[in-house]
Protein backbone atom coordinates (compact mmCIF):
# COMPACT_ATOMS: atom_id res chain seq x y z
CA UNK A 1 0.00 0.00 0.00
CA UNK A 2 1.16 3.51 -0.76
CA UNK A 3 0.82 5.59 2.37
CA UNK A 4 1.08 8.89 0.50
CA UNK A 5 -1.67 11.49 0.25
CA UNK A 6 -1.03 14.31 -2.25
CA UNK A 7 -3.40 17.21 -2.89
CA UNK A 8 -2.84 20.52 -4.66
CA UNK A 9 -4.65 23.66 -5.67
CA UNK A 10 -3.83 27.05 -7.10
CA UNK A 11 -4.25 30.36 -5.35
CA UNK A 12 -4.12 33.88 -6.82
CA UNK A 13 -1.26 34.95 -4.60
CA UNK A 14 2.53 34.97 -4.71
CA UNK A 15 4.44 32.06 -3.20
CA UNK A 16 5.60 34.46 -0.45
CA UNK A 17 2.01 35.36 0.46
CA UNK A 18 0.82 31.73 0.25
CA UNK A 19 3.67 30.55 2.52
CA UNK A 20 2.94 33.36 4.99
CA UNK A 21 -0.76 32.55 5.17
CA UNK A 22 -0.13 28.81 5.47
CA UNK A 23 2.31 29.25 8.35
CA UNK A 24 1.55 32.45 10.26
CA UNK A 25 -2.23 32.35 9.83
CA UNK A 26 -2.84 28.62 10.25
CA UNK A 27 -4.81 29.26 13.45
CA UNK A 28 -7.41 31.18 11.44
CA UNK A 29 -7.95 28.93 8.43
CA UNK A 30 -7.36 25.45 9.92
CA UNK A 31 -10.53 23.36 10.15
CA UNK A 32 -10.41 20.54 12.72
CA UNK A 33 -11.76 17.15 11.70
CA UNK A 34 -12.97 14.74 14.40
CA UNK A 35 -11.79 11.78 12.35
CA UNK A 36 -8.21 13.10 12.38
CA UNK A 37 -8.07 14.89 15.75
CA UNK A 38 -4.64 15.32 17.31
CA UNK A 39 -5.89 14.71 20.86
CA UNK A 40 -9.11 13.28 22.34
CA UNK A 41 -9.96 16.75 23.74
CA UNK A 42 -11.84 19.53 22.00
CA UNK A 43 -9.70 20.95 19.21
CA UNK A 44 -7.45 23.89 19.96
CA UNK A 45 -5.71 26.50 17.85
CA UNK A 46 -2.77 25.55 15.63
CA UNK A 47 0.38 27.64 15.28
CA UNK A 48 3.91 27.33 14.01
CA UNK A 49 7.09 28.24 15.80
CA UNK A 50 8.91 29.41 12.67
CA UNK A 51 12.21 28.06 11.45
CA UNK A 52 13.87 24.67 11.32
CA UNK A 53 13.64 23.09 14.75
CA UNK A 54 10.47 25.05 15.52
CA UNK A 55 7.24 23.21 16.18
CA UNK A 56 3.70 22.86 14.88
CA UNK A 57 1.56 22.96 18.02
CA UNK A 58 -2.08 22.86 19.05
CA UNK A 59 -2.96 25.07 22.02
CA UNK A 60 -6.05 23.77 23.79
CA UNK A 61 -8.65 25.92 25.56
CA UNK A 62 -7.08 24.89 28.90
CA UNK A 63 -3.78 26.42 27.78
CA UNK A 64 -2.16 23.00 27.43
CA UNK A 65 0.05 22.66 24.36
CA UNK A 66 0.28 19.51 22.24
CA UNK A 67 3.28 19.23 19.91
CA UNK A 68 2.13 17.87 16.58
CA UNK A 69 5.63 17.83 15.15
CA UNK A 70 8.98 19.48 14.68
CA UNK A 71 9.69 21.68 11.68
CA UNK A 72 12.27 19.79 9.61
CA UNK A 73 12.53 22.22 6.68
CA UNK A 74 11.49 25.88 6.75
CA UNK A 75 12.38 27.34 3.36
CA UNK A 76 10.14 30.31 2.57
CA UNK A 77 8.60 30.79 0.12
CA UNK A 78 9.14 27.37 -1.45
CA UNK A 79 8.89 24.52 1.03
CA UNK A 80 7.86 23.44 4.50
CA UNK A 81 8.32 19.97 6.02
CA UNK A 82 6.96 19.13 9.45
CA UNK A 83 6.55 15.98 11.52
CA UNK A 84 2.97 14.99 12.24
CA UNK A 85 1.66 12.88 15.07
CA UNK A 86 -1.46 12.30 17.07
CA UNK A 87 -1.53 11.85 20.85
CA UNK A 88 -2.30 8.14 20.38
CA UNK A 89 0.89 7.46 18.40
CA UNK A 90 3.58 5.41 20.11
CA UNK A 91 6.86 7.16 20.97
CA UNK A 92 8.89 7.63 17.81
CA UNK A 93 5.89 7.01 15.60
CA UNK A 94 5.14 9.92 13.27
CA UNK A 95 4.01 10.82 9.80
CA UNK A 96 5.30 13.78 7.83
CA UNK A 97 3.75 16.63 5.85
CA UNK A 98 5.59 18.45 3.08
CA UNK A 99 4.03 21.58 1.62
CA UNK A 100 5.39 23.09 -1.58
CA UNK A 101 4.61 26.56 -2.96
CA UNK A 102 5.29 26.83 -6.70
CA UNK A 103 4.73 29.90 -8.87
CA UNK A 104 2.52 29.15 -11.87
CA UNK A 105 2.19 32.36 -13.83
CA UNK A 106 0.59 34.88 -11.47
CA UNK A 107 -0.70 32.12 -9.19
CA UNK A 108 0.85 29.71 -6.73
CA UNK A 109 0.25 25.97 -6.64
CA UNK A 110 0.18 24.75 -3.05
CA UNK A 111 0.86 21.02 -2.84
CA UNK A 112 0.49 19.13 0.43
CA UNK A 113 2.00 15.65 0.63
CA UNK A 114 1.32 13.62 3.77
CA UNK A 115 3.45 10.46 4.05
CA UNK A 116 4.26 7.77 6.57
CA UNK A 117 0.85 6.27 7.29
CA UNK A 118 2.29 2.83 6.55
CA UNK A 119 4.18 3.20 9.87
CA UNK A 120 0.84 3.37 11.70
CA UNK A 121 -0.56 -0.17 12.10
CA UNK A 122 -3.87 -0.92 10.36
CA UNK A 123 -5.54 -1.60 13.73
CA UNK A 124 -4.41 1.69 15.28
CA UNK A 125 -7.19 3.94 16.58
CA UNK A 126 -5.97 6.79 14.32
CA UNK A 127 -6.98 4.72 11.29
CA UNK A 128 -10.53 4.10 12.60
CA UNK A 129 -10.68 0.55 11.27
CA UNK A 130 -10.97 1.86 7.71
CA UNK A 131 -9.44 -0.09 4.84
CA UNK A 132 -6.24 1.55 3.58
CA UNK A 133 -7.77 2.95 0.39
CA UNK A 134 -10.75 4.49 2.19
CA UNK A 135 -8.61 5.88 5.01
CA UNK A 136 -6.24 7.60 2.56
CA UNK A 137 -9.15 8.90 0.47
CA UNK A 138 -10.80 10.45 3.55
CA UNK A 139 -7.48 11.95 4.59
CA UNK A 140 -6.97 13.41 1.09
CA UNK A 141 -10.48 14.90 1.16
CA UNK A 142 -9.66 16.58 4.47
CA UNK A 143 -6.41 18.00 3.10
CA UNK A 144 -8.31 19.31 0.07
CA UNK A 145 -10.77 21.06 2.43
CA UNK A 146 -7.86 22.50 4.42
CA UNK A 147 -6.11 23.88 1.34
CA UNK A 148 -9.41 25.39 0.16
CA UNK A 149 -9.76 27.10 3.54
CA UNK A 150 -6.17 28.37 3.29
CA UNK A 151 -6.93 29.67 -0.19
CA UNK A 152 -9.79 31.79 1.14
CA UNK A 153 -7.49 33.25 3.82
CA UNK A 154 -4.86 34.58 1.38
CA UNK A 155 -6.56 37.66 -0.10
CA UNK A 156 -5.30 39.54 -3.11
CA UNK A 157 -6.07 43.19 -2.52
CA UNK A 158 -9.10 43.47 -0.26
CA UNK A 159 -11.12 40.44 -1.41
CA UNK A 160 -10.66 36.67 -1.22
CA UNK A 161 -8.43 34.85 -3.67
CA UNK A 162 -10.00 34.27 -7.07
CA UNK A 163 -10.37 30.68 -8.02
Image (spheres, rainbow, N blue to C red):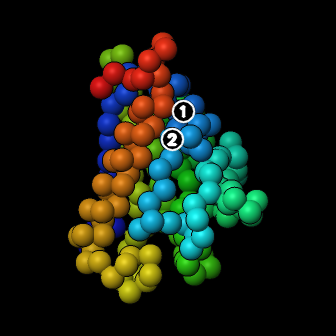
Total numbered circles:
2
Q: Can you give x and y, in whole percent of width and height, for residue 95 in the image?
A: 49, 66
Residue drawn at (44%, 18%) of the image: 159
Nearest to N terminus: mark 2 or mark 1:
1
**Closer-to-camera residue (107/134):** 134
Q: Is residue 75 visible?
A: no
**Closer-to-camera residue (128/108):** 128
Q: Is residue 143 visible?
A: yes
Vertical side of 40 occupied by 68: above or below: above
Q: Are marks 2 and 1 in contact (CB under 8 Å)?
A: yes
**Closer-to-camera residue (106/62):** 62
Q: Which residue is mark 1?
A: 21
Residue 100 found in image quarter: top left
Q: Nearer the viewer, mark 2 or mark 1?
A: 2
Residue drawn at (41%, 46%) of the image: 146
Q: Can you give x and y, in whole percent of width and height, for residue 27 in the image?
A: 59, 44
Image disc number at residue 55: none
Secondary structure under the numbered disc 2 in the rendered image: helix
Residue drawn at (51%, 41%) of the image: 29
Q: Can you give x and y, in whole percent of width and height, for residue 22 in the image?
A: 52, 38
Image quarter where the N terminus lies is: bottom left
Vertical side of 140 occupied by 39: above or below: below
Image disc number at residue 29: 2
Q: Can you give x and y, in whole percent of width and height, for residue 49 in the image?
A: 70, 46
Secondary structure under the numbered disc 1 in the rendered image: helix
Image quarter where the C terminus lies is: top left
Judged left or right of residue 134, residue 80 is right
Cα separation between marks 2 and 1: 9 Å
Q: Residue furthest top?
A: 157
Residue drawn at (44%, 81%) of the image: 125
| Mark 2 neighbour class, 10 Å CA radius: few under 14, some 14 to 19, many 20 or more | many
| Mark 1 neighbour class, 10 Å CA radius: few under 14, some 14 to 19, many 20 or more | many
Amino acid sequence: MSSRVVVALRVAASPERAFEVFTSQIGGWWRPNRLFAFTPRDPGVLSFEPGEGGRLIETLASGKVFEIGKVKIWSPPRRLVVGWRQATFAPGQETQVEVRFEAVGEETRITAEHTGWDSVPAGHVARHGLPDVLFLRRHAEWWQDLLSSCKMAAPRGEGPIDG
